[in-house]
Image: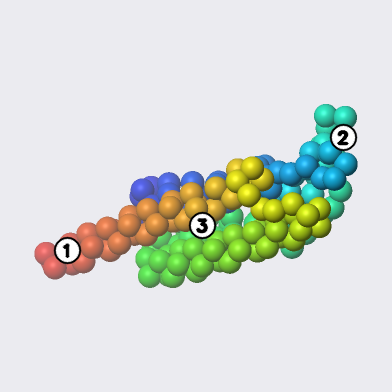
């Protein structure tokens, strides 16, 4: 049943992950004094109050799109709850690995300009990944509740 609460949690997780295309995961100032930001689509610099793309990150873009569409695919597997749970656990593991990849990418970028990775550099994108994991955990709770309801209904028959 698509209209269950876990569908909402999975949809919210997908929206939050796809939000990485909009929100930067790193903000910093380079040696010249230009404000720069890193998104999963690439590196952007502020030139004359406009964002100019300097470098493109195709692999991060593809990985973000795949991570964003796995919860959407999971919604339509409502008849197979075990497969839903498996996909959600795989998604959580992939989000953790993706977060490590973003962290390494951010520290590599900051090491080029001899600036340490700190709280002043963290963008909104880093906070989206844990929020997506929370939504996925809530979807797991909804799926387990459905499984429990189905088992109790089978006992009554």
Which of the two discs, 2 and 1, labels the residue nearer the N terminus?
Answer: 2
Residue under the image location 21 percent in, 66 percent down: 151
Label 2–label 1 contact, CB within 8 A: no
User: Vertically, is 145 above or below 127?
Assistant: below
Residue at the spot of label 3: 71
Callout 1 secondary element = helix
Classed neighbour count for the residue bearing mark 2: other residues with Cα under 10 Å, few (<14), some (14–19), many (≥20): few
Residue under the image location 36 percent in, 50 percent down: 4
Estimate the spatial distance between the alpha carbons at disc 2 and disc 3, rounded to whole Å.
37 Å
Q: Position of residue 62 (x, y in %)?
A: 70, 60
Say if residue 97 shows up in the picture.
yes
Say if residue 80 shows up in the picture.
no
Q: Position of residue 89 (x, y in %)?
A: 45, 67
Closer to viewer: mark 2 or mark 1? 2
Residue at the spot of label 2: 47
Classed neighbour count for the residue bearing mark 1: other residues with Cα under 10 Å, few (<14), some (14–19), many (≥20): few
Instruction: Check the picture and name the quadrant holding the N terminus.
Output: bottom left
Which of the two discs, 2 and 3, labels the residue nearer the N terminus?
Answer: 2
Which of the two discs, 1 and 3, labels the residue nearer the N terminus?
Answer: 3
| In the displayed structure image, the side of residue 69 where residue 34 appears, left or right | right
Label 1–label 3 contact, CB within 8 A: no
Callout 2 secondary element = strand
Closer to viewer: mark 1 or mark 3? 3
Q: Quadrant of residue 33?
A: top right
Residue under the image location 55 percent in, 61 percent down: 95
Residue reaching furthest left? 156
Callout 3 secondary element = helix
Residue reaching furthest top? 49
Closer to viewer: mark 2 or mark 3? 2
Residue at the spot of label 1: 152
User: Vertically, is 125 above or below 155?
Assistant: above
């Amino acid at each position: 049943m698509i209209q269950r609460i876990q569908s909402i949690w999975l949809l919210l997780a997908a929206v939050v992950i796809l939000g990485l295309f909009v929100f930067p995961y790193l903000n910093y100032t380079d040696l010249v004094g230009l404000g720069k930001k890193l998104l999963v689509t690439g590196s952007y610099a502020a030139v004359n109050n406009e964002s100019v793309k300097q470098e493109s990150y195709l692999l991060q873009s593809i990985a973000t799109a795949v991570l964003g569409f796995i919860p959407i695919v999971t919604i339509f597997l409502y008849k197979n709850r075990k497969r839903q749970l498996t996909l959600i656990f795989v998604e959580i593991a992939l989000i953790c690995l993706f977060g490590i990849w973003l962290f390494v990418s951010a520290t590599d970028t900051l090491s080029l300009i001899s600036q340490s990775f700190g709280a002043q550099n963290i963008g909104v994108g880093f906070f989206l990944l844990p929020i997506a994991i929370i939504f996925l955990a809530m979807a797991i709770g909804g799926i387990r509740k459905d499984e429990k309801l189905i088992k109790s209904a089978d006992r009554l028959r």
